[in-house]
Image (cartoon, rainbow, N blue to C red):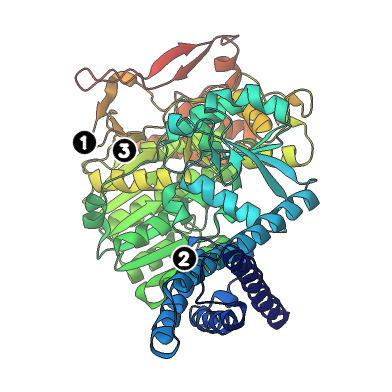
Amino acid sequence: MNRLRNFLLFAFDAVILIGIALVLGTFSLRYSLTDAVGQGNLIPHLTLLYICTVIFQFLFHTYDSLWRYAESREYLALLMAAFCGFCSYEVITRFVLDTGVISFLLLTAIAALWVLAMLLVRFAYRVGREHLQYRQGSHRISMAIVGAGTAGVQLLEEVQSNRDSPYHVECFFDDDNAKQGRRVRGVPVKGRIRDIPARVKAMDIREIVVAIPSITEARRQEILQELSGLDKVKIRVLPSTLDLLSQRPIRSQMRDIQIEDLLGRDPIRLDPAPVDAFLGGKTVMVTGGGGSIGSELCRQIVKHDPRRLVIVDIYENNAYDIQQELLYKYGGRLDLAVEIASIRDRERLRQLFAHYRPDVVFHAAAHKHVPLMEQSPQEAVRNNVFGTLNLVRTADEYGVSKFIQISTDKAVNPTSVMGATKRMCEIIVQSMKGRSRTAFAAVRFGNVLGSNGSVVPLFKRQIAEGGPITVTDKRIIRYFMTIPEAAQLVLQAGAMARQNELYVLDMGRPVKILDLAENLIRLSGYKPYRDIDIVETGLRPGEKLYEELLIASRDIEKTENDQIFVERQPTVTAEELERKLSILAAALEKNDPTVIRGALHQVVPTFHEPEELNRDQGQEVYIPEQSRQKTGKVLTFRQQVR
């Protein structure tokens, strides 16, 4: 087929040359424009011109080009081949043939028209093929691209050149005044971004791709909010500029809307130098290293060149997954050890600490699922409280430099067993102040996107299945942060830790779960309550309407990092801690969930039943939110919202 195609193109060029020569030659003779060239001796000139030009076309590989994909490079190569061919012809004719002045002008005109005709034929072939594909693909999904810049044009090119593409680009939208009313590769720019809702309704657009990778997250969130009200239009986005550097085809990087796109917060960018000094050349142990938070901590830690990374987890499948991921990426450059162990087993922990002698410990192992721990409070106490106690005492015994406890916003005024046990973990860490060479610290943050048990994957599955989406209570408000953001801030807080601080991460604006569900439905191309319903199922055991990050806002202080704060708390004495632990141990011996809950109420005074906090909220929900009143060192974190 390639040989046949080249032969046909080769022959077609010859036919074009002969046709142009006949027309111009006849015209020249009829009007007596030249006596030097007649019909008899015009043929050798044309043959020589054709041979010279074709030779250079082969040298420039113009017959090897796929003209349906041709760009400026292919057209320029054709012009250069024609120019070189004509120059060669001129050199030969001046030494071999006797050419008159008028004949030179005639042959120049023939050559110029011939080249122009070859260009037009190839361009017409490309346009005709695209038009045919357009007619054959009239059933394709109509798509609009937001952003007529480099990324948007590249996306358009890939959609147009791929016969198997399910899309047809109808138009662009762009805020650049210079692009209004113009066309980009034949596709019109229909207006500005604010014009999309009005224009799309009249154009039967089924999908919109936001192809402006260089914009800020805040601006991206504004655009997505504008588009979220469109009926039966699915919204997709291209990733950030840095993600596009992966060199994959830009069309393959289109993705569905993610919750991160709706948070309206720019990605956290931190100075790596303090963490490099904190972890570089150290032996770092991560408990729960196979979990969602623990595994991301491992990914971030290895970027700072630790001497050795030790992953400890009770669940071998997760531990194996992160082990293989890190070995595949870093190979022999990383000294990695993976140990299957339970933090409940003190002797096993002592064995590991004696063997590896970790300098830094990140403690992410815990039972975290709120409803499940309501059913099995004894397991939450054994694992979260006494497992943490084992780790803290072992770290102290073996002279660990720093111990970082991963906590949660559910530890603040807890309404669940899980939250109460995590508050006890904070108390255990606090109790070591002044009693150990190890610098203990806890880091508290809210929900992380994509973590095990996160609501976002559940919503997406429910949308994919046609709904309904289930929310426990339409008034619920939560903080959200991506897993990489949380892990980076944990490492930064660890680098700051000096004397048993409790660090609180800036989680940004709180998000109303109902708004989140509605936006995800709209941006998936559906209309809430019509195409996909949202059903309220009632609060689960231990769940409250809002989460808090602080116990007492007056004790919050800023750090050198704007996204990390310190909550100062009174010291817990060793005697007080032992009293609390003995109460819990006695309750565990009875193995009665009711008794264990009662014991948790005794040892964690801020532990309330969820009804106590939720019943008084009504339609007014009090949620914590950084008002960022940077007066002195105190931040106001509480705000009333309807």
Where 639 falls versus 76 (above or below)? above
SS type, badge 2:
helix
Q: Is residue 249 left or right of residue 392?
A: right
Circle 2: residue type = Leu
Residue, disc 2: 76
Task: Tell me the quarter of the picture where residue 429 sits.
Answer: top left
Determine whether label 1 and label 2 are within 8 Å by CB. Answer: no
Residue, disc 1: 560
Local crowd size for mark 3, using a 10 Å CA cut-off: few (<14), some (14–19), many (≥20):
many
Where does the N terminus fall, quadrant-wise?
bottom right
Q: Is residue 575 left or right of residue 580?
A: left
Q: Residue at x 42, y 58 (%)?
A: 299
The image position of residue 554, as x and y in percent, is 29, 18
Residue, disc 3: 430
The image position of residue 348, as x and y in percent, is 45, 64
Residue 327 visible at all: no
Circle 1: residue type = Glu
Local crowd size for mark 2, using a 10 Å CA cut-off: few (<14), some (14–19), many (≥20):
few
Task: Tell me the quarter of the picture where residue 283 sits.
Answer: bottom left
Q: Is residue 311 left or right of residue 185?
A: left
Circle 3: residue type = Gln
Q: Residue at x 42, y 37 (%)?
A: 215
The label nearer to you, 3 versus 1, is 1
Q: CA separation, marks 3 and 1?
A: 22 Å
Query: Earlier along the polypeptide chain: callout 1 or callout 2?
Result: 2
State the residue in front, 143 or 579: 143
The image position of residue 309, as x and y in percent, is 37, 65
Determine whether label 3 and label 2 are within 8 Å by CB. Answer: no
The label nearer to you, 1 versus 2, is 2
Q: CA separation, marks 1 and 2?
A: 58 Å
Q: Residue at x 35, y 18 (%)?
A: 627
